Image: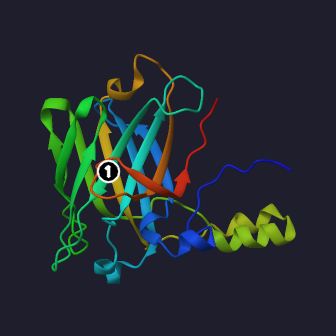
C-alpha cells in the first residue's frame, strides 16, 4: 500500500450530498505584496449557466488551520461563516483571523463573477474574496480512470481538462503571514468544513470534509 496525495471533487457518497461543504482544493502561496494567500474551493462542478444555484451555506463553518511547529496540531485557525442568501441571492461573510481580527463584507454574487468584490482591511493589510471562480484545478478524469484500469501512463497524452468551463465557490484570504507564523518559517495548512453549531462564531459541530497533507 502506498499513500496517495491528491485533491478531490465529489469524492465520497456522504459529502456528495452536501456540495456546499465539499472541499475541492486548498491552495497556499504568496501574492505580489509577499502576503500569504489561502484559498478553499467548494461547490464542485458548478455550471456557470446556473450560477444562481450555488452559494455558501449559513449552516457550515469553513476553517483554515495552520500548524507552524511541525506537530500536525493547529496553532492558529481562521474561521469563515456566511449569511443565508437573500431573495436576490446576496450573501455576506465574516472571516475571523488570529488576534481577534474580523473582516466582514459582501460575497461576489453569482450573477457578476467578472466584477469581483474584494473586501479590504487596510489597517491589518488583509484582503478577502468569496464567490464564484473558474475551477483552477487541471485534471483529465477520463484518462485517470483509464490509467487505473490499464496502468498505461500514455493515456494522459490526451491533454484534456475535465474541469474546463466549470466553476467553484472560492474563499480567498490574503494577509501578512506574521498573523499565523509566530516567527516560524514553515507552515502546514489544512482546510475543513464543519456543521456550524448555533450562532457562535467558531463553534463547530460534526466534521463534514477536510483537505490538506501537513508535511512533517
Closer to us: 186 or 192:
192
Q: Position of residue 5 (x, y in %)?
A: 67, 49
Number of numbered discs:
1
Closer to us: 70 or 141:
70
Q: Relative to 99, does residue 211 appear above or below in the rendering?
A: below
Mark 1 lies on a secondary structure that is: strand
- The residue at which mark 1 appears reads as 80
Closer to us: 29 or 39:
39
> In the displayed image of the protein, which residue is found farthest to the front?
198
Q: Relative to 48, does residue 108 appear above or below in the rendering?
A: above
Q: Residue at x 49, y 33 (%)?
A: 74
Crowd rating for badge 1 (residues with CA inside 10 Å; few <14, some 14–19, many 20+): many
> In the displayed image of the protein, which residue is found farthest to the top?
183
From the viewer's perspective, is 160 left or right of 109?
right
Q: Residue at x 59, y 63 (%)?
A: 139
Q: Residue at x 59, y 37 (%)?
A: 214
Give residue 196's quadrant in the image: bottom left
Q: Position of residue 188 (x, y in %)?
A: 53, 33
From the viewer's perspective, is 193 left or right of 34?
right
Residue 140 appearing in the image = yes
Residue 162 appearing in the image = no
Amino acid at each position: 500500500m502506498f499513500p496517495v496525495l491528491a485533491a478531490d471533487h465529489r469524492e465520497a457518497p456522504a459529502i456528495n450530498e452536501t456540495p456546499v461543504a465539499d472541499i475541492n482544493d486548498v491552495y497556499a502561496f504568496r501574492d505580489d505584496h509577499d502576503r500569504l494567500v489561502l484559498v478553499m474551493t467548494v461547490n464542485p462542478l458548478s455550471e456557470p449557466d446556473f450560477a444562481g444555484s450555488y452559494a455558501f451555506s449559513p449552516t457550515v463553518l469553513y476553517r483554515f488551520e495552520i500548524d507552524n511547529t511541525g506537530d500536525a496540531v493547529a496553532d492558529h485557525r481562521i474561521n469563515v461563516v456566511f449569511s443565508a442568501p437573500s431573495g436576490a441571492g446576496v450573501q455576506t461573510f465574516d472571516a475571523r483571523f488570529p488576534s481577534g481580527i474580523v473582516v466582514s463584507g459582501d460575497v461576489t454574487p453569482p450573477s457578476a463573477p467578472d466584477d469581483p468584490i474584494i473586501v479590504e482591511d487596510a489597517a491589518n493589510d488583509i484582503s478577502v474574496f468569496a464567490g464564484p471562480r473558474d475551477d483552477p484545478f487541471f485534471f483529465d478524469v477520463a484518462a485517470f480512470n483509464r490509467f487505473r484500469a490499464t496502468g498505461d501512463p500514455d493515456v494522459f497524452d490526451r491533454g484534456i481538462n475535465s474541469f474546463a468551463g466549470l466553476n467553484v465557490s472560492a474563499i480567498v484570504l490574503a494577509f501578512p503571514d506574521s498573523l499565523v507564523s509566530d516567527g516560524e518559517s514553515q507552515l502546514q495548512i489544512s482546510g475543513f468544513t464543519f456543521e456550524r453549531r448555533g450562532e457562535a462564531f467558531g463553534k463547530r459541530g460534526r466534521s463534514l470534509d477536510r483537505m490538506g497533507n501537513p508535511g512533517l
